[in-house]
Structure formats: structure tokens, C-alpha cells
């Protein structure tokens, strides 16, 4: 079996936290769940269900396995720059369905690590709500800006960030080796 080499475009984006739109009200029955160390397994499961089978799972192989997602979430929470106050999950009547993890890039900048929304819960505004909740959390913590990276081929995510006011700061090209075609 031969491997195909593909390049994905990754944009680093930034936003000022000066004038943010309000955090939207979640759909009826949905609630915010703040970070708690006892929820690592739930955060990892939401991460896995959101990213498996995606371009990002080809770029970050750990995203395609439950154990890999648990490792990613656990490693993020153990970092000295982890911002528990800007790390959130959304629970629906059927269970947890979306999450976001955040780090402190500096005393002035927050960094969004992962925005995960389980596919059957997409197009409900949960991704937008998660990002705005994290941005407002950064602002409450005294950060002036926030940044993230996004795979440009993920048009829905890229459009969301652009609509919120994120601006592209730099671009990198990441190669992936795949035995399957790129999604």
C-alpha cells in the first residue's frame, strides 16, 4: 500500500479582546460545564467524537483514537500555562457535545487549543458560543488578545473565526502522509 503525501494549510489567527460580541445564549436544555480535573475523560470523549475522521485527525494522528485524545487533553491540563478558567464544555440533554481548551500564550494573550463539536450537534451555534465564552474568559483574566490555529481546508471553522473578527497572522504548510484520500 502506498502512502500519499498531502499538504494542509494552517493559519495562525489573532483577535483583539477589546470589543467582543456577547456570549450567545445556548439552545434550550444546553448548559455550560466549567473545567474540572474530574472531567478529563468526558473532555477526551467529546474531542474524539468531534475530530475522528476529519482532516485534523490526519494531521494530528492522536485525534483519531480515544486514547490519543485522552492523552492530548491530559497533556494540555498538566501544562503550566493551562487556563482552566477559559476551558469549557457544553452539555446537551443527551450528554456532553462540545468543548474548548485554552492556554496562556503570555500575560497579554490567551491561546485557544481545540474547538470540538460532535458532528450531530454542529450548526447549532455551539462552536461560536464556545469561542466567545473562551474569549470573554481571557478578557476577565486580563488578556488583551487571543490566538488560535486552524486548518484552512476546514472552511466552516475558518469562516466562523473570520466572522468573529480573527485575522490571519501567518500561514504554514503541514504535510501529512495518508493511506487514504484526504477528506
Image (cartoon, rainbow, N blue to C red):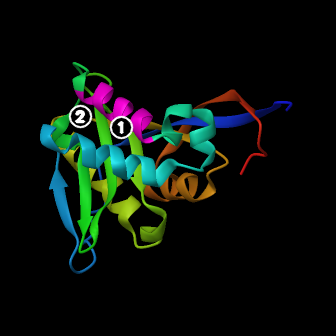
Given residues 155 and 75, the one toward you in this image is: 75
Local SS, label 1: strand
Q: Residues within 10 Å of mark 1 (few under 14, many from 20)?
A: many
Residue found farthest to the top: 80
**The N terminus: image quadrant:** top right
Q: Residues within 10 Å of mark 2 (few under 14, many from 20)?
A: many
Residue 164: x and y, percent? 43, 56
Say which residue label 1 marks: 146
On the question of residue 85 being in view, the answer is yes
Determine whether, in the image, residue 169 is placed left or right of residue 152.
left
Contact flag, marks 1 and 2 (Cβ < 8 Å)? yes
In the rendered image of this protein, does residue 148 appear above or below residue 137?
Answer: above
Q: Which residue is depicted at the point 56% across and 33% down?
A: 61
Determine whether, in the image, residue 173 is placed left or right of residue 96.
right
Local SS, label 2: loop
Residue 139: x and y, percent? 21, 42
Q: Which residue is depicted at the point 59% across and 50% down?
A: 53
Q: Which residues are magenta?
A: 66-77
Tell how many labels.
2
Q: CA distance from mark 1 to mark 2?
A: 8 Å
In the rendered image of this protein, does residue 126 appear above or below residue 153?
Answer: below
Magenta segment includes 69 = yes
On the question of residue 104 being in view, the answer is no
Say which residue label 2 marks: 143
Q: Which residue is depicted at the point 58% across and 42% down?
A: 56
Given residues 122 and 73, the one toward you in this image is: 73
Given residues 60 and 45, the one toward you in this image is: 45
Amino acid at each position: 500500500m502506498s502512502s500519499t503525501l498531502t499538504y494542509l494549510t494552517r493559519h495562525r489567527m489573532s483577535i483583539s479582546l477589546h470589543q467582543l460580541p456577547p456570549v450567545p445564549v445556548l439552545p434550550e436544555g444546553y448548559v455550560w460545564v466549567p473545567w474540572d480535573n474530574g472531567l478529563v475523560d468526558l473532555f477526551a470523549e467529546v474531542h474524539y467524537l468531534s475530530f475522528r475522521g476529519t482532516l485534523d485527525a490526519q494531521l494530528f494522528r492522536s485525534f483519531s483514537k480515544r486514547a490519543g485524545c485522552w492523552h492530548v487533553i491530559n497533556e494540555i491540563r498538566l501544562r503550566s500555562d493551562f487556563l482552566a478558567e477559559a476551558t469549557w464544555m457544553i452539555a446537551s440533554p443527551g450528554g456532553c457535545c462540545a468543548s474548548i481548551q485554552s492556554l496562556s500564550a503570555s500575560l497579554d494573550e490567551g491561546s485557544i487549543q481545540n474547538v470540538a463539536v460532535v458532528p450531530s450537534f454542529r450548526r447549532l451555534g455551539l462552536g461560536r458560543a464556545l469561542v466567545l465564552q473562551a474569549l470573554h474568559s481571557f478578557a476577565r483574566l486580563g488578556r488583551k488578545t487571543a490566538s488560535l490555529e486552524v486548518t484552512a481546508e476546514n472552511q466552516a471553522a475558518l469562516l466562523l473565526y473570520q466572522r468573529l473578527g480573527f485575522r490571519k497572522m501567518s500561514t504554514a504548510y503541514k504535510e501529512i502522509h495518508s493511506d487514504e484520500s484526504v477528506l
